[in-house]
Amino acid sequence: MLKKKIDLCAYLLPIITSILLLIIENGNGYKYFIKLEDLRPLISISYLILEIKLIFFLRAFETFGIYFAIMLVVARKIFSFLLILFLIISSFAHAFLVLLSPSYYSNDPWELTDKYINKKDNPDFTLYREPNEYTNLFLNYKNSLLGMYLFLASK
C-alpha cells in the first residue's frame, strides 16, 4: 500500500511541480500568486520521493536487494526505540518550555542579553543587543525540541 502511494506521488508530484515552474518562469508579464520561493518545499519533496522510487527500482538487482532487505530489518527493529526516544525528548522539551518560557522573572530574553557600556562622556548610557530566536531556546515548542536534541547530543 505504501509503495503504491509512493509510486503515485513519484509520478504526479514532479509533473505538477514542473507545470507550476513553467507557468511561473514563462509568465509573459503576468503576476501570479505563487512565487519560486514558495515552490522550494514542493521541489524538495519531489526530489525525495523520486530518490525513494530509485531505491525501489534498485531493489530488483541482487547486489542492492540484499542491502535494502538489511536496512528494512534494522528499521523495523529500531522503530520502537526511536519512538520512545522521541517521546522522552518531546516530554522534556515540553517541561522545559513551561519552566523556562519568558515571563516577568529573570529568564526574560531582555535580561539574558549582553550589555555594552558606552565609554564616552555619558557613562550611564547602556546599549542592549536585541535578542533573537537563539537567545532563549525555550520561546516556542520547535526551538525547545531543538534545545533538547542539542542537550542530548552534547553540543
Image (cartoon, rainbow, N blue to C red):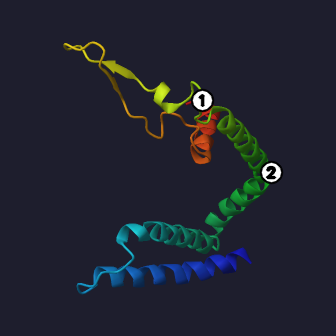
Q: Which of 71 and 20 is in front in this view?
A: 20
Q: Which mark is residue 90?
A: none
> Is residue 148 toward the left or the right of residue 125 in the image?
right
Q: Position of residue 16 (x, y in %)?
A: 47, 83
Q: Which residue is drawn at 48% across and 37% down?
A: 134
Q: Which of 150 and 7 is in front in this view?
A: 150
4 above or below 81?
below
Q: Which amino acid does label 1 sit on?
A: Ser
Q: Where is residue 71 in the image (x, y as percent from the top left)?
A: 69, 57
Residue named by callout 1: 154
Q: Where is residue 33 in the image (x, y as percent from the top left)?
A: 38, 78
Q: Quick one: quadrant of the N terminus?
A: bottom right
> In which image quadrant can residue 108 be found?
top right
Residue named by callout 2: 80
Q: Which of 81 and 144 is in front in this view?
A: 144
Q: Nearer the viewer, residue 108 or 125?
A: 125
Q: How crowded is mark 2: few (under 14 residues within 10 Å), some or many (20 or more)?
A: few
Q: Which amino acid does label 2 sit on?
A: Ser
Specify the farthest residue to the bottom.
Answer: 28
Ranked by sequence position, the earlier of labels 2 and 1 is: 2
> In which image quadrant can residue 6 be found?
bottom right
Q: What element carries label 1?
A: loop
Q: Which residue is drawn at 75% across and 41% down?
A: 88
Instruction: Kindly report the distance in space between the C-alpha atoms of the residues bearing marks 2 and 1.
Output: 23 Å
